[in-house]
Amino acid sequence: MPAPKAVALLTQPLSIAVVAILALLAAGELLSPGFASPRQIVTLLTIAALLGVVAAGQNLVILGGREGIDLSVGGIISFAAFLAGNIMQQQDAYLAQALLIVLCVSFLIGLTTGLGVTLLHIPPLVMTLGMLGVVQGGLVLLTRGVPSGRAAPTLSRIVSEPILFGLPGILFIWILVGVALTLVLRRTTFGFNVYAIGTNEPAAALAGVPVRRTRALLFALSGLLSGLTGILLLGYTEYVFVGAGDQYMLPSIIAVVIGGTSLAGGSGGYVGTMAGAIVLVLLQSILTTLNIPPFGRQIVFGVTLLGLMLLYGRQRRLRG
Amino acid sequence: MPVLEASGVRKQFGGVVALAGAQFALETGEVHALIGSNGCGKSTLCKIIAGSVAADAGSLLLDGRPVSFAGPRQAAAAGIGVFYQELSVIREMTVAENIYLGREPRNRVGMLDREALEAAVAAALSQFGEVLGAGVHPRTRVGDLSADQSQLVEILKVLAANPRIIIFDEATAALDRNQVTVVFQRIRTLKAEGRSVIFITHRMDEVFEIADRVTVMRNGATVFTCALAQTTRDALVGAMVGGAVVRAGRERRHVPSEAIALEVENLTSAKLAGVSFRLRRGEIVGLGGLHGQGQSELLRALFGATPLRSGAVRVGGETLDPRGPRAVMRRSIAYVSGDRGRYGVMAIRPIFENLVISLLARDRRWTVARQRLEGEISPFIERLKLKFSSLRAAVSELSGGNQQKVVLGRWLATRPSVLLLDDPTKGIDIQTKEDLYATMDELCSQGVAILLHSSDDEELLAVADRVLVFNGGQVMGELSGEQRTRFALYQAAYASKHPA
Amino acid sequence: MAAVVFLVLCTVNAVLQPTFLRFGVAASNVAAFLPMALVAVGQTYVVLASDIDLSAGAIVSLVNVVVVSIIDGMGGSGTSMALGLAAGLTLGLTCGVVNGLCVAYLRFQPIVTTFATGIVFAGFALWVLPEAGRQVPPALYLTYAGSVLGVPTVVWILAAAIAFAAIVARTRFYQALRATGGNMQAAYQTGVPVARVRLGAYTISGLFAALAAFALVGETASGDPLIGGALTLSSVTAVVLGGTALRGCVGGVTGSILGAFILGLISNVIFFAQLPFEWQGLIQGLIILTALAGGVVMARGRQD
């Protein structure tokens, strides 16, 4: 039965996202010749990589179900970027130390969120919003409202300069994150447990899955990946203003949804999310090309997300 | 002319056929019993009549005129009231708020009249008088009531709407004999007022006591309808089970050994009132009695899924603390629920993931070695005769019976020595049941011990070596050898007090 | 519980700030907390139905800039004020209806949906007024800051909100709302018009967001497209602090108003405790997180 198979393939979220990427590239090239030039594409992919890495954490939390969502990612990104910049102080000697400390701190912030969600049963929405307030407050305490710290030269070089085939290092880091996450989800016990608790938590618990540990770890990993994004962002822009991470909160959720991960949890994966991040960045770029002001982009974003809800995010009917 | 007539009603949930052409007619002023085994489609038929489930096909006539309800609201407006088996009360709201939900008395300016509401509810509650038990007032939160009290509140809620057609779906399940008597008096009054009643129950006595006619359902279809005066228990039971009766004398290859696999001493919990017994290796012990008397509770508590208050559990002579499923499974104990949708399958995930999830939990390895795992599960796929297109297909594509085999297979792959089966054949087809019985027999001949709860009494008597009869969270009798008959089972089940 | 915290905070505040109990200071505190309290009142109805409105703050921003733009654009006459407020009210209600239709009728997941509509509303706010500015005539903000019959206007508004809540609490709609939040399936089977009820709750939330926007116009006398941003989180926080369970059914508006005042008093206390400014954000964040966790845990304890 080739025909139904082809139809099924075409209606897969991933296929839709890929088609959307090609369509957006074509539209961009039509509107502004040079939009789809290799150089430009590399720039777009670099921006998409930053979004893609935080969306990886968001993706994990959403896969775990029970209204999983992480609204603290933006705060952690800003916090991590600030912390990293201040430890490095533009010196390569402190790079490793900075990476280690920042990743540990972000992991611990996420773990705290996860423990609040699992042990105290605080809804993720509330818990992550509360954590966002704490992280932002902590950032103000450390910065006193004044941005400071700069990236180590090596970090900037790795992130933005071509290192192989003319591609910047951040793309390889993103691919590495993608491969690692996909392997974790498909080839490890943890990954199987994530899908199990996201689909049917009571059944998973009765099948012997360590539900709490798994869910807490999801939030911790989301913290870790947000921290990594903060470091990459620092490397990309060399220094970071205080609210730099805020712009990632919403797009990280949208990228996951575009990529076909169900908001109900338990289905989807990271490859789709990577495509979703590219779609978003392309869309944003086209809107910029069209000279649409920021509010217009915002409106288009919101409406896009609502459209996606129509496709994927609908809830069960009350009538059987 | 019947007041209500349903014909050719079909309904499918996912891949599972719930109703395959049901015919049903309700006369004015009659009590019409609807009986059949678990999962035969009674509740689905009632929900279609009540508008809360949409039929795939079929017609519904009310007073001879075709009707099509958009939802329960429209059905209620047409005079249909339903007692839902799973109850439709809001636990966080009070008794008064629940009974008059959507029909609250209002004063002249349209505001709720709480005094009138509570007075009306107090009057309604007084109908039940003594049998209501202590602690039920209009302002009591329904979540604070006991199971039987909640059921009585649901009954009052249905009656408060003044319906002319009333569906009671297992309205007496948690009630004791005195409560049932009062409810039946009420039903007789309703009948005298010219109202019509559809009555679903699992207790045959009640059918003969209250109903005028009976319709028997089997596998999603109505089998026949007749007046109760013209039939017998045996005829009805025969119609329910159809040709394929599982007989008490079925062939058994396993022989229980003397070694004790599981020993339980004086277990108490929210729903268990001191349960003690021993399970030997290679033995199947059945947990029987009326529905919801602590059988499921015992199995779930043993597996650590619900907390115990006191008591001791020993596995192979050593103490077990059932503090959670993971702690219990480490002692080579497995639990399979018949409530597949809620407690069994991860429906949208592939069959493979569903089959290996417990193995992964047992092995505590980091990585998933697909080939090795496929090797570990394949003998059980064969033994259970599991049918599927691909291991990558979603479990939801399977029939209910095959889904149940997946859940069982998941646990068999961990090679348990004690198997806790909680109504595992609920709503699955006869062939699958036979496959499961054969597997259980084979497991026992290899020394596995099985604790089996079943809501199907015939099955329990046929499969188990001994049957413990539960009532009110206690073991009220034990049947073994030649005593394993329905008669003895019902005698023990009804032997003592009803649930409090 | 919320009442106890409220009284403790009042005491602490009075100790730290001796003028706290003076009439003028108390009135200005009410004026400062009023917008958050109003948004929290609207949010309560949505949460009682076990939904959530993450667009409330954006609606506040949008209504705020639209009202100010209309009044300023039309020269600040009496007619312009009436027209501006009427337009703002209609707009708030419309935003609420949009949310309700998406969630209740199109069956979108509430969290992400209202998140998305919030983004759209905030985008429109930036479109109408890209930067804070414009003016409203003194008549408007002087009335807001002044008194009517010897009682400050803001107290009248608060009293009106409480009266509204008291009336709603005695309607069939309110019972239906709680039933929907308590067990949506059971409510549906009982014949409760679940979709209509959820739509109603979102509409009320839109209405109160509009009222909060009016209060902010009176308070600041100008328009700001970002003014509502923080109100979404604080309204949810106030609702949870006030004892309304996020899973619905349990709670009420009075608690949410108390919750909003508690949040305001926390800021006050932190300010008057003369903590270094850079500590204030963190301390406030920690207190709120602790309070939220405490509120959720307490609510669960009651249920069990």
Image (cartoon, coloured by chain):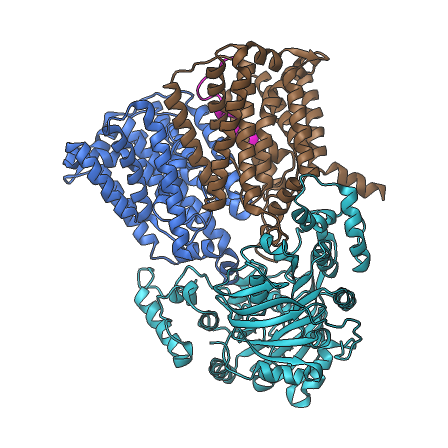
The colour assigned to chain C within the rendered structure: blue
* Quadrant location of the C terminus of chain C in the rendered image: bottom left
Image coordinates for residue C204, horizontal then vertical, percent: 39, 45
Q: Nearer the viewer, residue B390 or B164?
A: B390
Q: Which residues are magenta?
A: A238-252
Colour-to-chain, cyan = B
Residue depicted at 53% across the width and 36% down the height: A219
Residue A221 rendering spot, x and y as whole percentages: 56, 33
Inspect this view and state whether residue B383 appears: yes
**Residue name at image x 26 percent, y 28 percent:** C271
Outermost residue on the right side: it is A1
Residue at the image position 34 percent from the left and 61 percent from the top: B112
Is residue B211 visible from the viewing direction of this image? Answer: no
Residue A240 included in the magenta stretch of the image = yes
Image-quadrant location for residue C109: top right
The number of callouts visible is: 0
In the foreground, B71 or B354: B354
Expressed as whole percent of the image width and height from the top left, the position of residue C83 reads 34, 33
Q: Residue C148 vs residue A277: left or right?
A: left
Q: In front: B221, or C66?
A: B221
Q: Position of residue C108 (x, y in %)?
A: 55, 44
Identify by letter the chain in brown.
Answer: A
Q: Is residue C282 above or below residue B295?
A: above
Residue B227 versus residue B38 in the image, above or below: below
- Direction from residue B130 to residue A310 in the image, left or right: right
Q: Magenta span has B413?
A: no
